[in-house]
Amino acid sequence: MAATAQVHWDRLSRKRICFGHQSVGKNLIDGLMAGRQGRLNLVESSDPETFRHPVFAHFRVGQNRDPLAKFEDFKSVMTSGVGESVDVAFFKLCYVDITDCTDVGNLFNTYRRMMDDLVLTYPAVTFLHVTVPLRRLENGVLQWIKTQWRGDDRERLAQIKRHAYNELLRAAYGPSGRLFDLAAEEATYADGRASIIRHQGRAIPNLVSDYTDDGGHLNERAAERIAARLLACIDSIEEAVSDQ
């Protein structure tokens, strides 16, 4: 970790942070573990008692392929007593939660209503929003062959839906600064180039091949790099809050 990242560790080690996730989130937790150098008190818990002291607590939220269950589980954790104690709270969906059949507008509206209610109920909490992670899809000839063989390409359509959902998140929460754009991090090469697939003339973000070993989860190097960016995002938000 660079010296700048170490500043984030030190500041955030004094905060009470709650993060709900599943598999890609676990990759980020592993990335935090790899780079924390003992500064951050990382524990797996959603028990309100955990937040009596500074902590970065994470927990398995809901179940994969059921985004509404994740919404309800996160809300349940907040109303269990965590909302009265925590400084920062957030959770994320997984790429499998959005498919080619997802009603993106309805899903986003449900999320926004829930988060609006939580913000009103717990005004002292900084609620962070996170874009949905991506899959790694083939482009060009390989993609054409898959499409011809299968007769359709449901995973490609699912990626388009993920992008549509993320665009709604960016429009709603990007201006506030309380958005961690995980999908953008996943779709940007180390040199700043964008990883994309093409659909009807549009560029759709695509997970960088070097960041994954299985097409969906983050490998160790990518997880550590993106986890550091997550810390920087939380730190900048909390710094802004303290300056108000």
Image (cartoon, grey):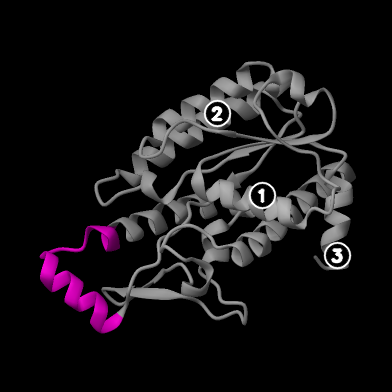
Of the numbered discs 2 and 3, the one sitting upstream in the chain is 3
Q: Position of residue 41 (x, y in %)?
A: 80, 39
Which amino acid lies under the numbered mark 3 shown in the image of this protein? Thr
Dot 1 surroundings within 10 Å: few (below 14), some, or many (20 or more)? few
Judged from the image, the secondary structure of the residue bearing numbered disc 3 is helix
Instruction: Give the left or right position of residue 41, taking residue 153 as reference.
Output: right
Q: Is residue 53 above or below residue 216?
A: above
Residue 84: quarter of image: top right
Residue 130 seen in the figure = no
Q: Position of residue 55 (x, y in %)?
A: 79, 35
In magenta segment, residue 102: no
Nearest to the observer: residue 237 or residue 223: 223
Residue at the spot x=50%, y=26% of the render? 73
Mark number, residue 150: none
For disc 3, the marked residue is: 4
Nearest to the observer: residue 72 or residue 228: 228
Real-space Cα distance between discs 2 and 3?
Answer: 31 Å
Of the numbered discs 1 and 3, the one sitting upstream in the chain is 3
For disc 1, the marked residue is: 176
The region drawn magenta spans 140-157
Dot 2 surroundings within 10 Å: few (below 14), some, or many (20 or more)? many
Judged from the image, the secondary structure of the residue bearing numbered disc 2 is helix
Q: Position of residue 60 (x, y in %)?
A: 54, 34
